[in-house]
Amino acid sequence: MPGLRAPFAAALALALALAWAAIPAAAQNSREAERRLEKVQSELKEVAAERRRIEGERGQATRQLREADEQVGRSSRNLRSIEQRIASEQATLAQLQQRRNDMQARLGTQRDELARLLRAAYQQGEDAPLKTFLAQDQVAQGGRLLTYHRYLQTDRVQRIAALTAELEQLDAIEREIASRHEQLESTRAQQRQQLAKLESDRKARAGLVSKLDQRYQDRSSRERELGRDAQGLQQVLKRLRDTAARAEAQRKAAAARAAREQANAGKPASVRRTPPPVAVASAPQVGGLGWPLSGALVAGYGGTLPDGRSSEGLLITAPAGAPVKAVADGQVVYAEWMTGYGLLLIVDHGNGYMSLYAHNDALLKDVGDTVKRGDPVATVGSSGGHGRPALYFELRRNGQPVNPGTWLRR
């Protein structure tokens, strides 16, 4: 047996030496992984802190954008109201002018008739009434003629006076309407200037929100990447520590076997099988009687929105300020700004159906208002940080989005 013990002793010494050599290498790799993990965790904290700071700035910018959208909405609604008042005043003024023309024509007729009466009296002479009275054979008839003649003159004079007074009133009303019209025109000009400034401010704030969103997404993506790196490094550290623990166990086992001088004919096999790798495999025009808006259909129901999300409704582009119409009779249950939707209006149509109109520039109806199909309820805009003027329309039943195609073709 002594001949067999010599080769075994040599093999045991070699295994012991390999085990001792594996420990420093594993320890060195473990320290390197720990340093990398500390660096990743430090950067992860900085990125997370910056992401939270950007999130706060984004929240404030979003609130400012909401305020800007609401101011634009109020200003647009006020401007629309002023323009309606101007149109009403113009219609009233046209009616008054027509009425004055009719009265002037009537006044001219009355004056002509009075002139004819006066000429007839002049032709008869100043003593015509006395002659008529002294004519005994025509006393009764002459008296009646004189009375009729006096009544006619008095009636003409009274009518002329009444028409003249009414014309003076009409002139005063026209002057008042003209003054109000001038004031409304001035107010409309100021309102348009204010609306232009608000639109400019809103675009600037929407741009800021967009930039903050991009920065937030960048930091969030970096935070996720660092999180994955940290998780990977933690797994590497675990494997390195497991390797070091196995090497230490092997060293202790080899030392014990050498001390006891026990034979070990077989070499321990520790084979790790690596799992096999896994194989990784132009807008149509819409509109019509039943539609809320005529324009270009950017995303249909179930399609993809410009930001990559799946569409649960319709996204239709149209010029800013275009009227948005109710698709059916109902009652307004929401008319306010909402994150992601901007100025949003919701109409309840009964039987669990509701229609949503988002990204408006102005809301023309208030909560509780009753609307009919085709009534303007809002105007197209880009509120909520939307990139271009468009309407996002949804139809929901019992709170769940449904395809509005069949509804809109009614």
Image: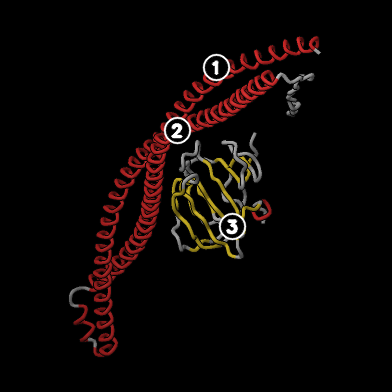
Disc 1 marks a residue whose amino acid type is: Gln
Question: Would residue 334 appear left or right of 139 to someone viewing this image?
Answer: right
Residue 264 appears left or right of 239? right
Query: Helix, strand, or loop for circle 3?
Result: loop
Residue drawn at x 25%, y 83% as measured from the top left: 147
The reply to whether residue 174 is visible in this rendering is yes
Find residue 307 and report its horizontal and vertical position in percent: 56, 36
Instruction: Tell which of 209 and 74 is nearer to you.
Output: 209
Mark nearer the N terminus (2 vs 3):
2
Q: Tell me: residue 118, above or below residue 5.
A: below
In the image, is residue 87 above or below residue 22? below
Kind of element beneath mark 2: helix
Residue bearing mark 3: 399
SS for tag 1?
helix
Q: Which residue is mark 1?
A: 28
Image quadrant holding the C terminus, namely bottom right
Q: How many angstroms separate mark 2 from mark 1 (CA)?
A: 30 Å
Tag shown at residue 48 = 2
Q: Disc 2 vs disc 1: which is toward the camera? A: 1
Q: How many marks?
A: 3
Marks 1, 3: nearer the viewer = 1
Q: Are marks 2 and 3 in contact (CB under 8 Å)?
A: no
